[in-house]
Image (spheres, grey):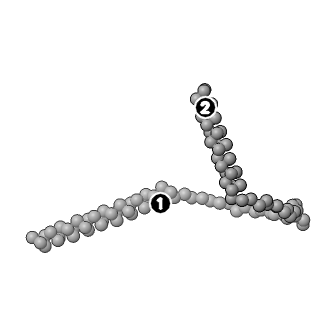
């Protein structure tokens, strides 16, 4: 009786393994057949000519930054947030009036 259970268990595992392998092969074959494309590219000749002088000139510019404190930055950010919230509130009121 024990041998029969082992045998049926082994047969089930072999069958499941075979079914899985078959499914994977069929899926892979179908996917490759569905995506197979043939591209024929013709050779292209291109000629590039470069000017002796570059067209653009480079100019150096100095940027002067002002010193600022964390409190000033915080105030500016808070002002921007308040203005954005006020704008959204106004848009909300306008949409309600329509």
- Foreground: disc 2 or disc 1: 2
Q: Secondary structure at mark 2?
A: helix
Furthest toward the bottom, the residue is 3
Q: Label 1 neighbourhood size at 10 Å, few (<14), some (14-19), many (20+)?
A: few
Identify the residue position indicated by label 1 in the image. 32
Split into 4 quadrants, where in the image is the C terminus? top right
Residue at x 40%, y 59% (from the top left corner)? 27
> 59 or 10, which lies in front?
59
Residue at x 79%, y 59% (from the top left corner)? 66
Q: Give residue 63's position: percent from left, percent from top.
A: 82, 61
Q: Is residue 51 visible?
A: no
Q: Label 2 neighbourhood size at 10 Å, few (<14), some (14-19), many (20+)?
A: few
Q: In the figure, residue 60 lies in which quadrant?
A: bottom right
Residue at x 81%, y 63% (from the top left corner)? 48
Identify the residue position indicated by label 2 in the image. 93
Question: How many labels, in total?
Answer: 2
Q: Is residue 91 left or right of residue 3?
A: right
> 47 or 60, which lies in front?
60
Split into 4 quadrants, where in the image is the N terminus? bottom left
Q: CA distance from mark 2 to mark 1?
A: 57 Å
Furthest toward the front, the residue is 71
Eyeballing the image, is 65 above or below 5?
above
Residue at x 43%, y 57% (from the top left corner)? 30
Q: Give residue 15's position: percent from left, percent from top.
A: 26, 65
Q: In the figure, residue 8 lies in which quadrant?
A: bottom left
Q: Give residue 49's position: percent from left, percent from top.
A: 84, 64
Q: Is residue 55 left or right of residue 29?
A: right
Q: Are marks 2 and 1 in contact (CB under 8 Å)?
A: no
Q: Is residue 18 left or right of residue 68?
A: left
Eyeballing the image, is 81 above or below 61?
above
Furthest toward the left, the residue is 1
Which circle's residue, 2 or 1, is located before the other in the chain? 1
């Amino acid at each position: 009786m024990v041998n029969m259970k082992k045998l049926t268990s082994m047969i089930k595992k072999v069958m499941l393994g075979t079914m899985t392998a078959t499914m994977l092969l069929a899926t892979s074959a179908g996917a490759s057949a569905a995506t197979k494309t043939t591209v024929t590219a013709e050779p292209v000749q291109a000629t590039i000519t470069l000017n002796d002088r570059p067209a653009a000139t480079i100019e150096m510019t100095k940027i002067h930054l002002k010193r600022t404190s964390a409190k000033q930055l915080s105030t500016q950010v808070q002002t921007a947030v308040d203005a954005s919230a006020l704008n959204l509130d106004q848009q909300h009121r306008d949409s309600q009036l329509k």
